[in-house]
Amino acid sequence: MKEENARAYWAANLRLIFTYVAIWFVVSYGCGILLVDELNQIQFFGFKLGFWFAQQGAIYVFLVLIIKYAHSMNKLDRKFDVHED
Amino acid sequence: MDIQTLTYLFVGGSFALYIGIAIWSRAGSTKDFYVAGGGVSPIANGAATAADWMSAASFISMAGIIAYSGYDASVYLMGWTGGYVLLAMLLAPYLRKFGKFTVPDFIGDRYYSNVARTVAVICVIFVSFTYVAGQMRGTGIVFARFLEVDVNVGVVIGMAIVFFYAVLGGMKGITYTQVAQYCVLIFAFLVPAVFLSIMMTGHVLPQTGFGATVLDSAGGDSGVYLLQKLDQVVTDLGFTEYTEGSKSTIDVFFIAAALMCGTAGLPHVIVRFFTVPRVKDARISAGWALFFIALLYTSAPAVGAFARLNLIDTVNETQYTELPEWFYNWENSGLIGWVDKNGDGAVQMRAGAPFEGKPTYAGSREEAKGSYGERVLTNAPTDNTSEVYIDRDIIVLANPEIGNLPGWVIALVAAGGVAAALSTAAGLLLVISSAISHDLLKKTLMPDISEKQELLAARGAAVVAIVIAGYFGINPPGFVAQVVAFAFGLAAASFFPVILMGIFYKRMNKEGAIAGMLVGLVFTFSYIVFFKFISPELNTAEHWWLGVSPEGIGTLGMVLNFVVAFSVSRVTAPPPEHIQHIVEDIRIPRGAGEASAH
């Protein structure tokens, strides 16, 4: 039972990681590098959108991703009863 | 009070603070010395990580690089922040659970091999020394500019300060000093950034001012966006558009990946996450670290854009004799050079280098004065219309003067530059000393030494490391500037894949890990050495393999590492049972005893 629980916890963690890494990839390599020319056609306040992602937006998204992940994992730890203290 | 006195006061005051913290937080045990006793709060660890991470290069050079290369510099902004996402999700919590002192510790235990441990130790020492030499030099340069002492005297002062708190306090002393250093450096960076933003756009936040409209000379809204104006101004002068890139997409992609994975694999960053009490603290601490880093990293592009526009406004087409004071001062320091090609007495900023190489002068201003009072250059002029060389490192250091900010801001920037250089140097020196005393002596060569002897050895190793780093600071090997690619490339090609597979792939064995590390290392090392040292004349896009520059080659090295490690592990024996249990154990946050009981 314990082993099964550990396996289910790990699978849930991997799902989270996969989702967040995908977002991480899309905002930085996608919006900031590969699609930058297309996005630059769009004006976002005083910025070209692609340029904004590369110099500002990607960093904000990174920060949100870490906070979201830490938060989701705290919940997951409790749900599978593997949390500390 | 004049600027000189203020600077002495600010820098001296910050030193007194660091030394006070060092005395208060002395290390009593090896656990204190290596991981600060393991009781650092996630916020304090975040601030310490940020100071550890942001070197003299981030503080002094980055905004200047952005000012000069616009969009192309985005790769550094994303590359040096994106790695924290990987750290938070893929490495830090599991390494914290593993609960040892160093990165080679993990590699040696997980791959049940002293060969793997030794390879890791060599990488740690190489990567860290590469990095630290530049930091010591950076301290010396800041001293020389602002306190008018010799660069070498500056290096020695820096060594003495680091010596005091790193040897005495170990990780514990370093952590709390870094928190203080972070406060000094972020304040020093943001104050001029906010001033500039208000001056140019009326916005308090540089992050929004950067995307706002510029104010006209009367202080009213001109209705033109800052970046539009900048694009217009630079293209008129023949430069490429500020918001567009000039590097190939594939190369930018590879460089960004090498910087991100390299960040996540740098030992002095990873080891910081061993100092927090719990696994959940390690996750959120990476978030705090990125928050503190982002304060600087999202302001820097704004500072770059403001400075570029301001610089062109002030300098371009202005008569040399009517330039502001700072221009002459930095010309005296050898970071500005002007050659009046068209003989009109005005300074023309245009695309292209004004002359070959960095400026070399015929003598001091008194000895060799040109017809407008400028310092005469001995460089051969190029045949374009560009007339002025302005070193990009000036941007941050001279911003307060360019923006006419009060004297105390200039003094603050000096203290910030020193804080950035010292905090990074201390973190790196600690990693070197623990690799020697813990991984090499205690775990490999002399397993019988007592804790007391190990602590003594750690302090001794720190002393030796500081002396060597200081030596490199005073006699910088010519390649220092070019070896940043080394540190990130090697970390990305060696540590990152090996640690990742150690956690996420239970079947990975020592044969696979060692083969992968060696292939990744040798490949990346050879590629960089070939293009940077053996045949620098071939270092252009058409000769690069797959169009990847030496800066981005670590990414390919990493891919090779993964492929080789995976293939070798498939055809060799799986790791022993107890190792597989270790892997299961580090995946679960709760205490080691319980998790291994099943």
Image (spheres, rainbow, N blue to C red):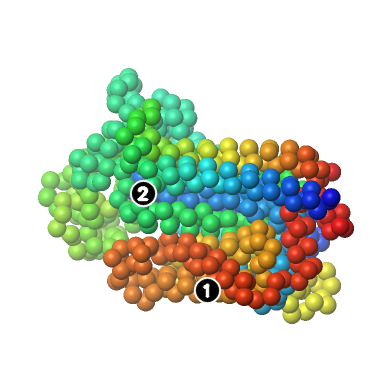
- Tell me which chain the residue with mark 1 is part of: B
Disc assigned to residue B72? 2
Between B372 and B110, the one nearer to me in the picture = B110
Between B370 and B217, the one nearer to me in the picture = B217
Residue type, numbered disc 2: Asp
Q: Position of residue B537 (x, y in %)?
A: 29, 71
- The answer, for residue B187, to whether it is visible in the render is yes
Quarter occupied by residue B97: bottom right
Q: Residue at x 31, y 43 (%)?
A: B244
Q: CA distance from mark 2 to mark 1?
A: 30 Å
Between B543 and B508, the one nearer to me in the picture = B508
Crowding around mark 2 (Cα neighbors within 10 Å: few <14, some 14 to 19, many 20+) is: many
Residue at the spot of label 1: B519
Between B1 and B56, the one nearer to me in the picture = B56
Query: Where is B444 relative to B590, above or below?
Result: below
Disc assigned to residue B352? none
Q: Residue at x 50, y 50 (%)?
A: B80
Name the element at disc 2. Answer: helix
Q: Residue at x 72, y 71 (%)?
A: B575
Q: Position of residue B195 (x, y in %)?
A: 44, 32
Q: Residue furthest top?
A: B220
Crowding around mark 1 (Cα neighbors within 10 Å: few <14, some 14 to 19, many 20+) is: many
Q: Quadrant of the C terminus of chain B?
A: bottom right
In the drawing, does residue A84 fall left or right of residue B372?
Answer: right
Name the element at disc 1. Answer: helix
Q: Residue at x 54, y 71 (%)?
A: B564
- Tell me which chain the residue with mark 2 is part of: B
Q: Position of residue B382 (x, y in %)?
A: 18, 59
In the drawing, does residue B280 fall left or right of residue A47?
Answer: right
- The answer, for residue B134, to whether it is visible in the render is no
- Is the residue under label 1 in contact with that under label 2 (CB below 8 Å)? no
Q: Position of residue B206 (x, y in %)?
A: 45, 33
